[in-house]
Amino acid sequence: MPELASTPLVGTVVHGAGRGTGLGFPTANLSPAPGTAVPPPAIYSGWLTRPATGDVHRATVSIGTNPTFGDSAEVHVEVHCHDAPDGLHLYGERVELRFVARLRDTEKFATVDELLAAAREDVRRSDALLAAAPAPAAPTP
Ligand SMILES: Cc1cc2nc3c(=O)[nH]c(=O)nc-3n(C[C@H](O)[C@H](O)[C@H](O)COP(=O)(O)O)c2cc1C
């Protein structure tokens, strides 16, 4: 498996398709800053940090075209923060993502229930990995 980038992915939070909250998996959608490296499509574990506030959140990240829904050719960077069941409302904020592990390939699921079961398992694994990993220092603006 290729090494995960050691430099953070820097991006601005933008509006997604708006499905995530209804699915019980709210995600912050990031528009990567020009020149920032985006890892290949997959599901990842990592830290979301907010230079604006100094907050650090455990996160599970989906990078891909959301093939289960098949309505987009665009690669989305979507971040689910484990401690924010209702989502974080960060529109317009610049945030950073530090990747800790690649969890699995993105899949095209036959049903939304299968996607949700896989995403719950991803978050469970991701949370255990992050609990054992050193948290990054709180970022400064
Ligand atoms: C932990 C996690 C795992 C995901 N895995 C997949 C996947 O394997 N296949 C897929 O099509 N979408 C996957 N997604 C993306 C969801 O399809 C997406 O978050 C949902 O459609 C909401 O998109 P929206 O925020 O743009 O509305 C995953 C999302 C999360 C948070």
Image (tube, helix red, strand yellow):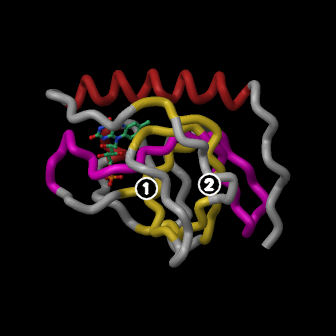
Residue found 64% across the figure and 60% down from its top: 96
User: Residues at badges 1 and 2 in contact (C-beta under 8 Å)?
Assistant: yes
Q: Which residue is mark 1?
A: 77
* Ligand number 1: quarter of image: top left
Seen in the picture, residue 85 relative to 140 is either above or below; the reply is: above
Looking at the picture, which amino acid does disc 2 mark?
Leu
Seen in the picture, residue 76 relative to 20 is either above or below; the reply is: below
Q: In the depicted view, which residue is nearer to us: 85 or 78?
A: 78
Q: Which residue is mark 2?
A: 97
- Left or right for 42, reference 115: right
Q: Residues within 10 Å of mark 1 (few under 14, many from 20)?
A: many
Q: Residue reaching furthest bottom?
A: 34
Q: Residues within 10 Å of mark 2 (few under 14, many from 20)?
A: many
Q: Is mark 2 within 8 Å of ligand 1?
A: no
Q: Position of residue 19 (x, y in %)?
A: 29, 49
Q: Is residue 84 visible?
A: no
Residue found 42% across the figure and 30% down from its top: 104
Q: Position of residue 13 (x, y in %)?
A: 50, 66
Secondary structure under tag 1 reads strand
- Is 107 inside the magenta-drawn segment? no
Q: In the depicted view, which residue is nearer to us: 18 or 115?
A: 115
The stretch of residues the image draws in magenta is 46-71
Looking at the picture, which amino acid does disc 1 mark?
Val
Q: Point out the image quarter for the C terminus.
A: bottom right
Residue found 43% across the figure and 56% down from its top: 77
- Left or right for 76, reference 3: left
